């Protein structure tokens, strides 16, 4: 799922509202962005083309509805991130994300519970562009901060 930062602002507004017109979206994001209605319409058009939003007509206005929930979108974005990284580096990526995130006790417990239930893989193979048998990836060399 390839959603730009600007498109994500629009999506967050729509997820909050569940469905919305251009005017409703504009009001929701006005405090954080100084975008014209034309800019918002352009971003909405891109999101419709990406099939992340669908439109219905209500009188003279279009109503935009998401085709997936925010949780589904986040899961897809997380998978996209992992798809871009060597499988041997997953622990470093996940550790960096945890270290970068502000987490409540409940959030930490949720992560701990997920890890406790995770069945370990017997072996993780390199999935880099270089598909040779000798992995040149060294997870321990990855910097711990972004």
Image: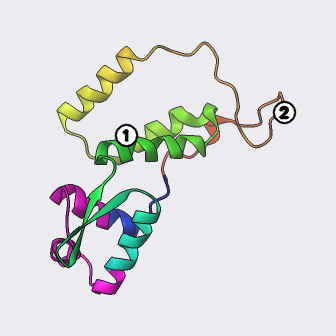
Q: Residue at x 20, y 60 (%)?
A: 19
Q: Tell me whether the residue at label 1 lies in contact with that at label 2, contact meaning CB atoms closer than 8 angstroms.
A: no
Q: Is residue 18 above or below residue 23?
A: above
> Magenta segment, principal secondary structure?
helix
- In the picture, the disc for residue 2 is none
Using the image, tell me which numbered label, if any, was put on residue 98.
Answer: 1
Quadrant of residue 83 in the image?
A: top right
The x and y percentages for residue 97 are: 41, 43
Local crowd at mark 2 within 10 Å, few (<14), some, or many (≥20)? few
- Asked if residue 14 is positioned above or below residue 108 in the image, the reply reads below
In the displayed structure image, the side of residue 17 where residue 138 appears, left or right: right
Residue drawn where x is 54% and y is 34% of the image? 90
Q: Which of 32 and 95 is in front in this view?
A: 32
Residue 35 appears anywhere in the view: no
Q: Write the start and end of the magenta stretch as one range.
A: 10-39
Residue 127 position within the rendered picture, expressed as x and y whole percent measured from the top left: 70, 34
Label 1 neighbour load within 10 Å: few <14, some 14-19, many 20+: few
Find the distance from the CA under tag 1 to the CA under tag 2.
31 Å
Quickly name the residue at label 2.
132
Image mark count: 2
Q: Can residue 133 be seen in this view?
A: yes
- Answer left or right for 19 relative to 54: left
Q: Is 72 in the magenta?
A: no
Q: How is the image coloured?
A: rainbow
Q: Nearer the viewer, mark 1 or mark 2?
A: 2
Tag 2 secondary structure: loop
State the residue at coordinates (44%, 37%).
95
Left-right relation of 17 to 103: left
Residue 68 drawn at (x, y percent):
33, 47
Residue 102 location (% of width, % of height): 26, 46
- The disc, 1 or 2, on the residue closer to the chain's N-terminal end is 1
Q: Quadrant of residue 20?
A: bottom left
């Amino acid at each position: 799922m390839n959603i730009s930062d600007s498109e994500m602002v629009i999506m967050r507004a729509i997820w909050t509202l569940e469905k919305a017109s251009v005017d409703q979206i504009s009001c929701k994001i006005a405090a954080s962005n100084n975008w014209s209605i034309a800019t918002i319409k352009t971003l909405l058009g891109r999101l419709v083309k990406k099939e992340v939003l669908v439109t219905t007509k209500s009188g003279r206005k279009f109503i935009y509805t998401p085709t997936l929930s925010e949780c589904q979108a986040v899961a897809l974005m997380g998978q996209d991130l992992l798809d871009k990284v060597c499988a041997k580096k997953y622990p470093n990526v996940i550790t960096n994300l945890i270290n970068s995130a502000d987490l409540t006790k409940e959030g930490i417990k949720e992560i701990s519970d997920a890890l406790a239930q995770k069945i370990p893989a017997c072996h993780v193979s390199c999935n880099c562009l270089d598909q040779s048998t000798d992995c040149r990836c060294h997870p321990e060399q990855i910097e711990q901060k972004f």
